[in-house]
Image (cartoon, grey):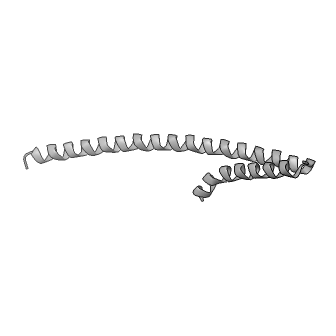
């Protein structure tokens, strides 16, 4: 599903380009066609903004994962040191 979202904006942009080329080639532009073109343009802008927002969110999540992984590595290191120290104690 995510892959389809990534391709939606370019597909809409291409559709706008093809539509505008066909409209120009036909000679006249009706109000309905112009309104549809503006609507598609606004949808592309909205999708691009959403894509950028999701990229930023992904970046933040990846940063959080790295922080958690560092903490986990530190905990594992302390655990191993503690285990080694316990093994050194007389029994």
Q: Position of residue 27 (x, y in %)?
A: 89, 49
Farthest residue in the left direction?
Answer: 90
Tally the numbered discs. Answer: 0
Name the spot of residue 74 as percent of width and height, x first.
30, 40
Considering only vertical position in the picture, is 57 above or below 22?
above
Pick the residue in front: 90 or 53: 53
Quarter of the image with the N terminus is bottom right
Of the pair 55 and 80, the residue shown nearer to us: 55
Residue occupying image coordinates x 10% and y 44%: 88
Q: Tell me what residue is drawn at x 71 percent, y 48 percent.
A: 13
What is the residue that sits farthest to the bottom in this orientation?
1
The residue shown at (79%, 49%) is 21
Q: Answer left or right for 78 relative to 39.
A: left
Left or right placement of residue 33 versus residue 76 in this view? right
For this rendering, which residue is in front, 69 or 32?
Answer: 32
Image spot of residue 90 (x, y percent):
7, 46
Which residue is rendered at x = 62% and y = 45% of the image? Answer: 51
| Camera-nearest residue between 36 and 26 | 26
């Amino acid at each position: 599903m995510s892959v389809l979202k990534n391709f939606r904006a370019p597909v809409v942009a291409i559709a706008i380009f093809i539509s505008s080329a066909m409209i120009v080639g036909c000679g006249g532009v009706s109000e309905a066609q112009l309104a549809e073109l503006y609507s598609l343009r606004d949808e592309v802008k909205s999708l691009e903004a959403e894509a950028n927002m999701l990229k930023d969110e992904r970046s933040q999540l990846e940063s959080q994962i790295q922080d958690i992984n560092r903490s986990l590595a530190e905990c594992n290191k302390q655990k191993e040191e503690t285990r080694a120290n316990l093994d050194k104690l007389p029994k």
